[in-house]
Image (cartoon, rainbow, N blue to C red):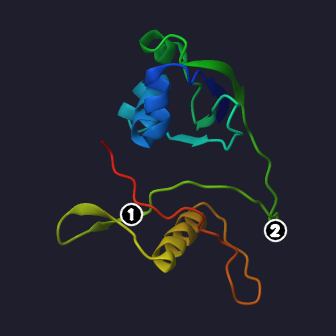
Amino acid sequence: MWVSKLVLDSRLREVRWAIANPYALHQALSWAVRDGLERKEERLLWRLEPTRSMDRPVVLVQTWSRPDWNEVLARWPHFAEIHGPKPFNPVLSPGQRLRFRLRANPAKRDAAIRKRVALKTPVEKVRWLEDRLRAGGFRLPERDGQRPVRILQDVFLRAF
């Protein structure tokens, strides 16, 4: 895996629009691994980091293959100051506890209408997370019969 850090130039209109529109930011970042995504051999994960109001926005990006950020900069010069990519090969141990932040769009395929539909309740969303973790060999720990999951922002985001 590879990890890159992009420090965005929020003076640019395109960057401000991408920050406000997660779908647009995902599309812009996708250019760095476009071929792998088209072949369904790539996975692009990214997160806009929380920053103080006067700091430049930072995006962390994780990919399976080495991203080519020149593809993004060819379309949007000055989009970001790019750090990396750096190889990322975590060594995990059984029983190791991990803590992470996740911004996700939990959904399921509705067989009746053959479309993906958003999961709405916190119970559905936590179950979705548990299913994804289990598929990767992880599980949420329990404390006093409760799962340590906090949903901090529960809004429906729609692609423009």
Image quadrant where one finds the N terminus: top right
Q: Amino acid at mark 1?
A: Ala
The x, y position of residue 100, in whole percent, is 70, 56
- The percent coordinates of residue 74 (x first, y second) are 46, 10
What residue sits right under mark 2 in the picture? 95
Q: Calculate the distance from the C-alpha at mark 2 to the C-alpha at mark 1.
A: 29 Å
Kindly state the secondary structure of the residue where label 2 is placed. loop
Q: Please, what secondary structure does the residue beneath circle 1 have? A: strand
Q: Residue at x 42, y 26 (%)?
A: 34
**Location of residue 144 (image quadrant):** bottom right
Q: Is residue 160 above or below residue 104?
A: above
Q: Which residue is mark 1?
A: 107
Q: Which mark is residue 62?
A: none
What residue is rendered at 70% in x and 31% in y? 55
Amino acid type indicated by mark 2: Gly
Give the number of the mark in front: 2 or 1. 1
